[in-house]
Amino acid sequence: MSRSNDIADSVRRAIERYFRDLDGEKPAGIYSMVLESVERSMLETVMQHAEGNQTIAADMLGINRNTLRRKLTDHSLL
């Protein structure tokens, strides 16, 4: 199994667990909840592996450093 399939499977399991844990509540805002959670976790982990170096982290993520800074700010990680 490829790494991207591993990640997709982990997300799928987490979403299934979310639905099981709703306990009768109506789900709402799933799309933004998942994207925000995944993005924040990814940014935290990549920044840790890059030892806080934003240039290295941006390269690892395949995004522009300014985009990374905006995302870090959006997630209150700066």
Image (cartoon, grey):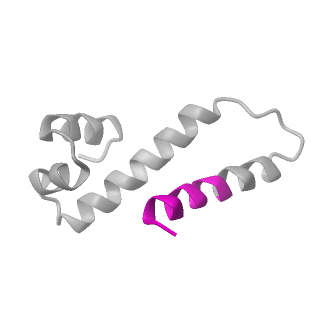
Residue in view at x 18 percent, y 48 percent: 58
Residue 50: x %, y % from top left: 18, 64
Residue 15: x %, y % from top left: 67, 50
The residue sitting at the right extreme is 24
**Residue 68, quarter of the rendered image:** top left
In the displayed structure, would residue 1 be above or below residue 61? below
Residue 12: x %, y % from top left: 64, 53
As rendered, which of 8 and 15 lies closer to the eye?
8
Q: Is residue 64 left or right of residue 33?
A: left
Total marks shown come to 0
Residue in view at x 56 percent, y 38 percent: 33
In the displayed structure, would residue 71 be above or below residue 54? above
Q: Is residue 22 left or right of residue 67?
A: right
Residue in view at x 22 percent, y 47 percent: 62
Q: Which residues are magenta?
A: 1-13
Q: Is residue 18 left or right of residue 2?
A: right
Residue 44: x %, y % from top left: 33, 56
